[in-house]
Amino acid sequence: MTEFGGPEALHLLDVPEVHAGPGEVRLRVTAAAVSPTDTYARNGTYAQRPGAPQEMPWIPGMDVAGVVDEVGEGTDTPLSVGDRVMGIVVPVGAHGGYREQIVLPAASVAPVPAGADDAAASTLPMNGLTARLALDRMGLAPGQVLAVTGAAGAFGGYVVQLAKVDGLVVVADAAEADRELVRSLGADVVLDRGAGFADAVLDRYPGGVDGLADGSLQGAEVARAVRDGGVVTTVRGYRGEDDALARGVRFEPVMVRDYAQNAAALDTLRAQAEAGEVTLRVADVLPAAEGATAHARLEAGGVRGRLVLQF
């Protein structure tokens, strides 16, 4: 974008060529996933944060896949020119994933899962790492109970799947149309989404669950389903209400930038995708020039899996 606004603010631009420096690799991008975070970048919400850079163009996009076409001098990486890879992008002004060429830290890049095309691979890094970070911050032990809101979404779906790999019992929400999807992801208990979710959880677990990953941003309404001394992870910086804090509930806002150069975690996600432990879900693939259409579709709601822009 050259100005913030609605989906129509997205348009094609030429930007300068970039080159990989020490510790970096350059990708020829073939696919970039579209996420809700990208819409906040586009509409100017993130630009209001203290210290946010104001330069234009502002390029959204936190997930890419493509081919390594340059390795920075002295970069310690197993990656080579020609490798098919996926990567996580921390957008800052012009540094976003919706571009044909991007330079990333080598630690933000991993091979594409075997058998996956670039569109599917581009859906994994940001949401997969956010889910991994959320579970790591909660620190629950095998056999403990985790509730997940927004379980049909990309973040929530990965939380469900990774939690099952970790040995947790998962109670997830779903609309009627999404129940089979959420069950297929591995949820042990599927309850109706919405205002009644916390009560339904407490009916089943009267003392409350051990943890909650609040992917649908319900805040205090669902935090009451967590036991005294339990833990909640949030994805929009929510830090809890007085009632929950008084009960000793620990709130862990997760910011994926904390894992953006966790090469080991990203490569583990690759291996888990290859093993079928996490599912790469593509809703649709659109030409990059139709970025505005993709944003409009995402904001209209009901998208399951990720829309992907193809370059």
Image (tube, rainbow, N blue to C red):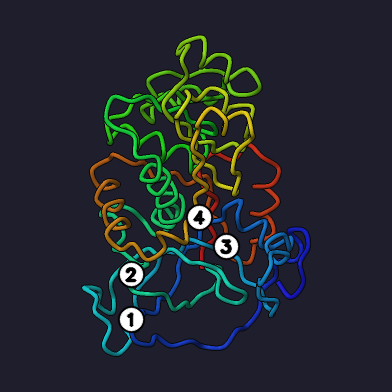
Could you tell me residue 308's position as x and y percent? 52, 55
Say which label, 1 or 2, has the lower sequence index: 1
- CA gap, disc 1 to disc 3? 31 Å
Disc 4: which residue: 255
> Is disc 4 placed on a helix, strand or loop?
loop
In this view, the residue in front, 219 or 216, is 219
Q: In the rendered structure, are the residues bearing label 1 and label 3 in contact, judged by CB atoms less than 8 Å apart?
A: no
Say which label, 4 or 1, has the lower sequence index: 1
Say which label, 3 or 2, has the lower sequence index: 2
Residue type marked 1: Gly
Question: At 47% from the left edge and 77% from the top edge, which residue is drawn?
Answer: 102
- CA gap, disc 3 to disc 4? 29 Å
Dot in front, 1 or 3 = 1
Could you tell me residue 309's position as x and y percent? 54, 60
Say which label, 4 or 2, has the lower sequence index: 2
Dot in front, 4 or 1 = 4
Disc 3: which residue: 287
Say which label, 1 or 3, has the lower sequence index: 1
Dot in front, 4 or 2 = 4
| Tag shown at residue 107 | 2
- CA gap, disc 3 to disc 2? 28 Å
Q: Check disc 4: other Cα within 10 Å, few if <14, some if 14-19, many if 20+.
A: some
> Is disc 1 placed on a helix, strand or loop?
loop
Residue 60 in the figure: left or right of residue 161: right
Q: In the rendered structure, are the residues bearing label 1 and label 2 in contact, judged by CB atoms less than 8 Å apart?
A: yes
Disc 1: which residue: 23
Determine the image quadrant of residue 54. bottom right
Dot in front, 3 or 4 = 4
Q: Check disc 1: other Cα within 10 Å, few if <14, some if 14-19, many if 20+.
A: some
Dot in front, 3 or 2 = 2
In this view, the residue in front, 252 or 120, is 252
